[in-house]
Image: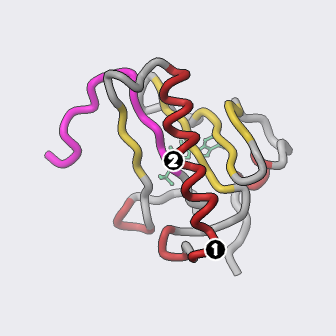
Amino acid sequence: MAEETIFSKIIRREIPADILYQDDLVTAFRDINARAPTHILIIPNHLIATTNDVKASDEKALGRMVTVAAKLAQEAGIAEDGYRIIMNCNKHGGQEVYHIHMHLLGGCSLGPMLS
Ligand code: 5GP
């Protein structure tokens, strides 16, 4: 059984976060350590530790994460120029918080992904 992270407290609004969107499936909030002018995290409301743990029953929430990312990109005015969506998995992927999250990054040129 995966252990709750700080993201569960953000979902329940037990600790402060700049929440931009929340519905029955997902929550989106600004990353506390922004790596781009727009840096938003989109997470499922239920705990999934890593992308290795995603099940077919999670597909609705994961689809919603992408829909919400696109909506927030439009609202942030970064959709036309473009943006990057990243999900890190485990140690080699650089995952720090074990509650899956989609990074939405944009507002500047991010350069090539792998260089
Ligand atoms: P990861 O490396 O796991 O893909 O990314 C975790 C992200 O969560 C990091 O970009 C980090 O800045 C962000 N983060 C960690 N703790 C908090 C927090 O308490 N509040 C917010 N808003 N972001 C956090």
Extreme residue toward the left, this view: 115
Q: Residue at x 50, y 25 (%)?
A: 74
Q: Is residue 96 left or right of residue 20?
A: left
Percent across and percent down for residue 110 are 28, 31
Residue type marked 2: Val
Q: Residues within 10 Å of mark 2 (few under 14, many from 20)?
A: some
Above or below, comparing residue 108 to residue 101 in the picture: above
Kindly indicate the quadrant of the structure image that contains residue 8. Answer: bottom right
- Quadrant of the rendering where the N terminus is positioned: bottom right
Residue corresponding to mark 2: 66
The reply to whether the magenta stretch includes residue 5 is: no
Q: Residue at x 73, y 65 (%)?
A: 4
Q: Is residue 73 left or right of residue 108?
A: right
Above or below, comparing residue 67 to residue 83 in the picture: below
Residue type marked 1: Ser
Q: Main secondary structure of the magenta part?
A: loop
Residue corresponding to mark 1: 57
Mark sitting earlier along the chain (1/2): 1
Of residues 35 and 67, the one drawn nearer to the viewer in this rendering: 67
For the residues labelled 1 and 2, say whether their Cβ atoms are less than 8 Å apart: no
The reply to whether the magenta stretch includes residue 109 is: yes
Q: Residue at x 73, y 40 (%)?
A: 22
